[in-house]
Image (cartoon, rainbow, N blue to C red):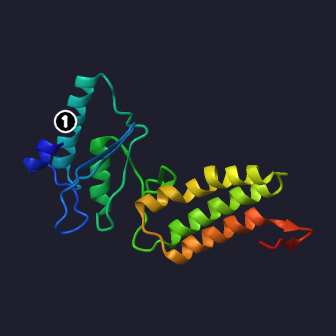
């Protein structure tokens, strides 16, 4: 892939003007490839994947493989590229490691997802008779980890972090006969 980028047979993406070109990201069993939406670049990537398959003995599962395109890509180009690759076209590739792969400039969708996820976990635990130690373990092991990964990837607004802290605090202190306990 690096050689193809150096030879300019593949054009990845840049996240900023001075940033390096990104042609691929590899994670455990998942890979993301970035290229211009044209048949020539698709054929180069297919050649690289074929070479990888021959060298490693592994095969790409094209039934699980999808392609998504930038907003300005024409429909006929999407279909042509997808047909050449033998993959499905999707608008939003879904989630990876619990986060949506398409966020955009507004973090509202991300914060809503995290807030809902944490709220559902806390609601499920509320019905359980837990000791202080049990609540503490759940908060430290589960509740805090829900937002930790997102915070390592995105800068979340401080008021949102305060909102999450408040949800956890309400769970910690709980209620007694419908009345809040005094912290």
Seen from the viewer's position, the closer of residues 133 and 146 is 133
Q: Residue furthest left?
A: 7
* Image height of 137 relative to 126, above or below: above
Return the x and y of residue 181 as percentages of the image width and height.
83, 71
Determine whether the residue tagged by mark 1 lies in a helix, strand or loop. helix
Asked whether, in this view, residue 58 is left or right of residue 98, the answer is left
Image quarter (top left, top right, bottom left or bottom right) of the C terminus: bottom right
Q: Which residue is mark 1?
A: 47
Return the x and y of residue 55 as percentages of the image width and height.
22, 24
Return the x and y of residue 119 as percentages of the image width and height.
68, 63
Occupied quadrant, residue 45: top left
What residue is shown at x 59% (from left), y 57% (from top)? 144
Q: Residue furthest right?
A: 177
Occupied quadrant, residue 72: bottom left
Return the x and y of residue 133 as percentages of the image width and height.
74, 50
Q: Residue furthest bottom?
A: 159
What residue is shown at x 33% (from left), y 25% (from top)? 58
What residue is shown at x 18% (from left), y 48% (from top)? 41
What residue is shown at x 27% (from left), y 57% (from top)? 77
Asked whether, in this view, residue 129 is left or right of residue 77, the answer is right
Task: Count up the numbered dots.
Answer: 1
Q: Residues within 10 Å of mark 1 (few under 14, many from 20)?
A: few
**Can I make out residue 153 in this image?**
yes
Image quarter (top left, top right, bottom left or bottom right) of the N terminus: top left
Seen from the viewer's position, the closer of residues 75 and 161 is 161
* Image height of 118 relative to 50, above or below: below
Seen from the viewer's position, the closer of residues 112 and 118 is 118
**Can I make out residue 9 in this image?**
no
């Amino acid at each position: 892939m690096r050689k193809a980028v150096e030879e300019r047979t593949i054009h990845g993406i840049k996240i900023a003007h001075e940033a390096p070109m990104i042609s691929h990201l590899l994670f455990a069993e998942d890979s993301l490839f970035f290229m211009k939406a044209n048949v020539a670049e698709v054929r180069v990537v297919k050649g690289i994947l074929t070479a990888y398959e021959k060298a490693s003995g592994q095969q790409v599962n094209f039934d699980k493989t999808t392609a998504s395109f930038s907003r300005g890509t024409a429909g006929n180009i999407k279909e042509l590229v997808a047909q050449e690759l033998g993959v499905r076209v999707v608008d939003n590739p879904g989630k990876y490691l619990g986060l949506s792969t398409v966020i955009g400039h507004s973090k509202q969708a991300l914060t809503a997802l995290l807030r809902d996820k944490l709220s559902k976990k806390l609601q499920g635990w509320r019905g359980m008779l837990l000791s202080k130690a049990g609540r503490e373990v759940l908060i430290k092991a589960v509740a805090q980890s829900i937002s930790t990964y997102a915070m390592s990837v995105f800068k979340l607004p401080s008021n949102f972090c305060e909102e999450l802290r408040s949800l956890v605090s309400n769970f910690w202190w709980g209620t007694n006969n419908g009345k809040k306990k005094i912290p």
